[in-house]
Image: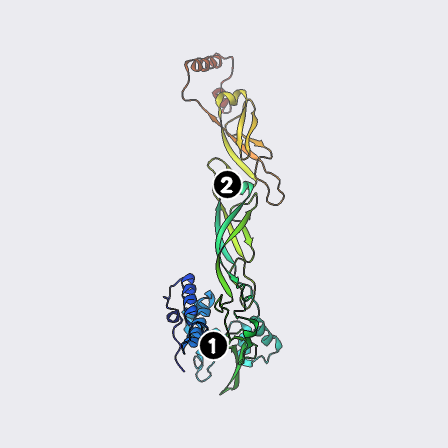
Amino acid sequence: MAEKRDYYDVLGVSRNASADEIKSAYRKLAKKYHPDLNKAPDAAEKFKEVNEAYEVLGDADKRAKYDQFGFAGVDPQAAAGGGFGNMGGFSSGSFDDLNDIFSSFFGGGMGSGFSSSRRASQGPRKGEDKFMRMNISFMDACFGKTETINISVDEKCDACGGTGAASPSDIDTCPRCHGLGRVVTQQRTMLGIMQTESECPECHGTGKKIRRYCPKCNGAGYLHKRVSVDVKIPAGINSGQQLRIAGKGERGTNGGPNGDLYIEINVLPHDKFVRDGKTIYLDIPVSAVDATLGCTLDVPTIRGEVTMKIPAGTQNGAQLRLRGEGVPDLRTGRNGDQICTVKVQIDRTLTKREKELYQELKDIQDSGQGETMWQRFKKNFS
């Protein structure tokens, strides 16, 4: 029997190739050696070799095991004879969980629960979820928006319905495992008969054999597509919160559904407004005269200007509330408030008349007709 070639050599890619590079190499070789397109005597064998390599390198988990353990990490049969002297047939790749351990030693003799769980593992499985991050503007977070993004997804082939076969009649039951997807082997050891259960090497656990592959997906059962997805951003969303887009994650296996796409939101800061939950904060400059005598100002909010009254005698740092001018609550839709922090500004340049008026005010205070601020301060120490 010919020695297996390294899967990276089979696909003609480097060991640090990206997932897209591996997928691209597979599609080219699958088309090149497809038995319906290539009549060379060794085309079918090479096509099988290419599919076997991609089944491992195209799966992130299997690829990691292959990189670490070689063929033993992805094919328990490849590890036969290692680790326990003459008791071959066991490998780290065989023991996926405790059920595997009992199954390998006792062949399902501990009860039907073990063998049934192994068969269930070959059933439809949902794909892994994907995660990405999206930056949105401050105002889009406040009011919501629908954003269109472009993503890469593997979608079920519409020509074969995900079977990978040219037609339903081209799908046969695997003659080796009889459709179970698992094979049981027995070995005679010093401890007696050892029974091991592993994935069927003929059908790779599917329980099926395909005679003619679907010409559209080359037997993969799915198509790699670049699609546009509308992401509805709700009003009131905040940084760190996630949106879920169903079915746009990694592809499922054995006919299972795709995983989901999770988008983590990052709200970009505003140059004037500051947000804390539903509340908006804004610093507003107020002149010393307006703070002393009081006034009305047209104050900016996220919805436009709103008239606000500044009471007479307002101090620097005072906070005034504009009710209902904050961010909508993500669950109830009720608006939060806007808090305006007064920043009393002292004029550095005065007209001649303004200086005269300030001097007149100072003279009044110095003449004893009114108590100065400094005098009031010193009283606290007497």
Across and down, in percent, residue 9 comes to: 37, 71
Is label 2 in a helix, a strand or a loop? helix
Q: Amino acid at mark 2?
A: Phe
**Residue 207, visible in the rendered structure:** no
Does 328 sit left or right of 134 as displayed? right
Dot label at residue 158: none
Quarter placement of the N terminus: bottom left
Which residue position is annotated with label 1?
Answer: 76
Task: Give the quadrant of residue 278.
Answer: top right
Residue sitting nearer the eye, 304 or 247:
247
* Pointer 2 residue: 138
Q: Earlier in the sequence, mark 2 or mark 1?
A: 1
- At label 1, which amino acid type do we have? Pro
Tell me, yes or no, if residue 97 can be seen here.
Answer: yes
Residue drawn at the location 60% of the way across and 75% of the way down: 116
Please state the horizontal and vertical placement of residue 94, each as a whole percent of the image. 49, 75
Along the viewing direction, whichever of 202 and 87 lies nearer the viewer: 202
Q: Position of residue 263 (x, y in %)?
A: 51, 52
